[in-house]
Structure formats: structure tokens, C-alpha cells
Image: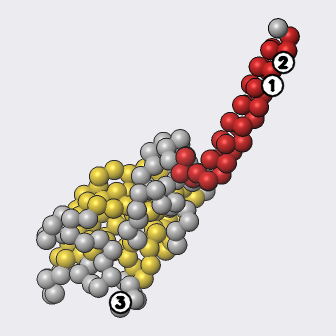
Amino acid sequence: MDQPGDSLRLRHYVTIFTSSAFDHFGILGLAGNGFAGSYCPSFPQVAVVSKLNRGAFISRRPFLARNSGAIAVDLQCDPFEDGDLGFIGFKFNNGSGDQYGWVRIQLGHNDRDFWIADYAYADPGEPIRAGQTASNDMVAEEGSLAGLALGAAGLLAWRNTRSRSARQSAARA
């Protein structure tokens, strides 16, 4: 991340007492942080990340104001299954305002290993979608119906202007 104290963290550990494996995602920001997620219905003390699809708006997700959430914890509410590839939404604040971002992780098979495939975050106040890596990336999807309507209106106006010019040229000839 771009400021001292801002960081992403992935952690995998096994408990000696239960032989259970736990995978966690963490985000830290100097003035605040959180991740898109919820609490596990069967274990309400456990916060879990939401597995997001490509193109999901990050800022529209429900966020938990915590610095860590479970990815896979051998419970009935695991968002990621063995071999899954998916996005985790996060927000952080380094003093300039909330910044939203995503991290794409790949979960291994059986042993619950995982790794970061890539990540990105926007400037304070700017929206970002899961998988978006540039400001003009996925723009057509944001308001595709409105964009289509504006495009159709623009095309109609251009055609009308063009045909009017063609009629005027023909009348002068």
C-alpha cells in the first residue's frame, strides 16, 4: 500500500488442539480499515470475508470495521472452497479519506494454502469494481443502459445533422 502503516495480510495456521486450519485476510489503515463481509450465522463470533465476483462494486458492499476476517476456517460458512479463485473487497483510510480496493486470491486444494493473484485500490473517494485495474476499465458496464440511450440519441442527432447538410447541398446544386 502507499503509506507507512497501510498493509494487506494473509495468514494460514493450524491449531494444535483441534487440528483445524484457519485462513485469514487482514487490512490495516492508519485512520481506519474494514473488509466486505459478514458474521458466520452458526458461529456469530467469527467474521468472514465475502467472496466477490469480477465487476462487483466494492463500495456498495456491507463492511465490517475489523482488521481481519476468515477466508476458510473449516466451518459451515466458509466463503472460499478448495481451489476457488475470487475477490475480497476492502477499505482503508490513511488520513485522506476512505479508499476502496480488492485483492484476488487463489485457494489451494485440500491443504488450504492460498496466495494473492493481484490487487488494486482507488484514490480516496473514487469507486472501484472487483478486477478493475484502470480508471477506464469496466466503464461501459457502469451505466450500460444509460450509455446505450445516450449513444443512440447522439447517433440520431448526428444522422439528422448529416442528412440536413446533404439536403442543403443538393438544393444548392
- Which of disc 3 and disc 2 is earlier in sequence? 3
Graded by Cα atoms within 10 Å as few (under 14), some (14 to 19) or many (20 or more), the crowding at tag 1 reads few
Distance (Cα) linking label 2 and label 1: 6 Å
Q: Residue at x 49, y 74 (%)?
A: 64
Task: Please say if the residues under marks 2 and 1 sit with CB atoms less than 8 Å apart.
Answer: yes
Q: Amino acid at mark 2?
A: Gln
- Check disc 2: other Cα within 10 Å, few if <14, some if 14-19, many if 20+: few
Q: Amino acid at mark 1?
A: Arg
What residue is at 34 percent from the left and 50 percent from the top? 118
Left or right for 45, reference 21: right
Confirm or deny contact between disc 2 and disc 3 (CB under 8 A). no
What label does residue 39 carry, if any?
A: none
Residue 127 location, x and y as percent? 57, 54
With respect to residue 68, does 30 lie above or below?
Answer: above
Residue 37 sits above or below residue 166 on the image: below
According to the picture, the residue beneath numbered tag 1 turns out to be 164
Cα separation, mark 2 vs mark 3, equals: 76 Å
State the residue position of label 3. 43
Q: Nearer the viewer, residue 46 or 162?
A: 162
Q: Nearer the viewer, residue 50 or 116?
A: 50
Q: Which of label 2 and label 3 is nearer to you?
A: 2
| Position of residue 141 measured from the top left corner of the image (x, y, whole percent) | 53, 51
Circle 2 sits in a helix, a strand or a loop, which is it? helix
Residue at 80%, 21% in the rendered image: 167
The crowding category of the residue bearing disc 3, from other C-alpha atoms within 10 Å (few below 14, some 14 to 19, many at least 20), is few
Q: Is residue 146 visible?
A: yes
Tally the marks: 3
Q: Name the residue beneath numbered marker 2.
A: 168
